[in-house]
Amino acid sequence: MKKSTFLIISLALIFMNCGGDNSKKNELKKQAEEYAESMKIEEEIGGQVKAMFQPLPAVAENPDNPITDEKLKLGKILYFDNRLSKDQTQSCNTCHNLSTFGVDNKQFSDGDDGTSLGDRNSPTVLNAAFHTSQFWDSRAQDVEEQAGLPILNPVEMNIPSEDFVIKRLAATDLYPPLFTAAFPEDSNPLTFDNLMKAIGAFERTLVTPSKFDDYLKGNKGALSLEEKKGLKTFINVGCLTCHTGSQLGGNMLQKFGVYDNYWDLTGSDPIDEGRFKETGNEADKYMFKVPTLRNVAMTYPYFHDGSVEKLEDAVKIIAKLNLNKDITEEEAKRIVIFLNTLTGDVPEDVKKIPDELNPAS
């Protein structure tokens, strides 16, 4: 006899032996009905869940950049250090704040000069090392390459050259010994390439498992009935077309607006041509990396242009644009209930500014 069948029968027997206690009868009846419905959903979607999703690994390994304690220490200090921007106003953490799920919750992030803004919404850094490419237009292949590009971007961190920032770091008492410890085999360890490797190594540890991972690992009780209904709706609506794997995204590019223009639904202005701006290839017009849905409930506003504030609205818009479906309010709410199961977090000590950057230390 299946465990689920045994439990339902047991609940029914208890229900029948509750005598005149109607409140207890009603509660047990409700539990039995919910359990039966939960098991029915498991039978309906279990195969798809197993085929299309995987739990998060503990760390995003890169054989070309092995993680060491010394490299992690250096990478974290660099991640929080404003000296990586020209006017020393910005760090990696400014736009990708670890205390707010790896984003700044702004439509566009502030630039180093205090007045300029970036032209795309800052995506979360959490779990990003698992993605097959970086940035909305996939112009970087991994987090190591990605780490260097904002530093040299004339709006974001505005460092004029690699040599500029390396000379700045070399002039401190802090960094030369840290780079030497992190890259002991290098005759000249304090380089821009090693700076990128150190930040990349740190970012590869920013992994945020959630209750959904417990569910994927076999704990069917990790999700409530309502959360399972949301997962079923997520699957039935067709969200699996793009949002699969351990990240529920981050593994492909897709045209934003397969069935309609995104700017007509989001009110976006100016219109962003996506990867086309990078390649000039007509086939890349309006192509963007599919974002991860990990922590999506916390990483508003949504889409590459940060044009949508509410997750339910974003769900309805993407269903219309890329699946040609007008989903109901109830369907959107159910999907959002499921998406909340993807919220995880990094430990508090990871979010803490390193003591080495505290002037009082």
Image: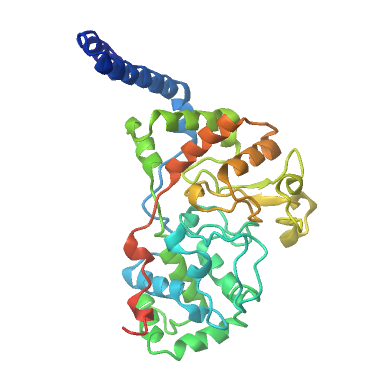
Q: Is residue 162 left or right of residue 206?
A: right
Q: Looking at the rendering, in which quadrant would you find the C terminus?
A: bottom left
Check the image and name the residue furthest to the right.
282
Q: Is residue 171 above or below residue 157?
A: below
Can residue 63 be seen here? no
**Residue drawn 56% across the image and 27% down it:** 236
Q: Position of residue 240 (x, y in %)?
A: 56, 35
Q: Residue at x 51, y 48 (%)?
A: 296
Q: Is residue 37 above or below residue 95?
A: above
Nearest to the observer: residue 4 or residue 75: 4
| 274 relative to 102 in the view: left or right | right
- Where residue 152 appears, x then y in whole percent? 61, 76
Could you tell me how many numbered marks the image carries? 0
From this view, report whether residue 184 is shown above or below residue 247: below
Q: Residue at x 40, y 54 (%)?
A: 207
Taking depth in this image into account, of 168 and 123 the one nearest to the observer is 123
